[in-house]
Image: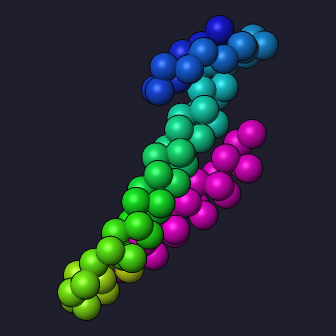
Amino acid sequence: MIDDAMGHMYQTQGGDQSKQKLPLYLNDALSIENVAAQRLTTRIGEVTLQDARNQLEHYLQETEEHQNRLRQLIFTVW
């Protein structure tokens, strides 16, 4: 069993534990980015100042890029 950064326990099948942990850590990072994207989307709908909305939309775009990169990494190492 290994414990990931979010406190979840996973069964291992031998081998190098650091290689086994990497996809789990990447998945945790993707979960965090998913929550950030949801919150940004909510805030964009609430904000009335156009400058603030533009900045939040920029942050959302960056977050979506992070999500895509993490998905690619997870697929590569899994």
Q: Residue 62 lies in magenta, yes or no?
A: yes
- Picture coordinates of residue 29 (x, y %)? 49, 44
* Residue 42 seen in render: yes
Q: In which quarter of the image is the N terminus?
A: top right
Instruction: Tell me the quarter of the picture where residue 39 sits.
Output: bottom left
Q: Residue furthest right?
A: 13
Q: In this view, does 72 lie above or below 28?
A: below
- Picture coordinates of residue 18 (x, y %)? 58, 24
4 on left or right of 11: left
Which residue is located at x 46 percent, y 46 percent? 32
Which residue is located at x 67 percent, y 57 percent? 72
Q: Residue 13 lies in magenta, yes or no?
A: no
Q: In this view, does 59 lie above or below 69?
A: below
Q: Quadrant of the C terminus?
A: top right
- Judging depth in this view, the residue of 16 and 66 nearest the camera is 66
- Judging depth in this view, the residue of 59 and 68 nearest the camera is 59
51 on left or right of 10: left
- Picture coordinates of residue 77 (x, y %)? 70, 42
Q: Is residue 77 above or below residue 43?
A: above
Main secondary structure of the magenta stretch? helix
* Residue 55 seen in render: no
- Picture coordinates of residue 21 (x, y %)? 59, 26
Q: Is residue 33 above or below residue 17?
A: below
Q: What stretch is highlighted in magenta?
A: 58-78
Which residue is located at x 47 percent, y 60 percent? 38
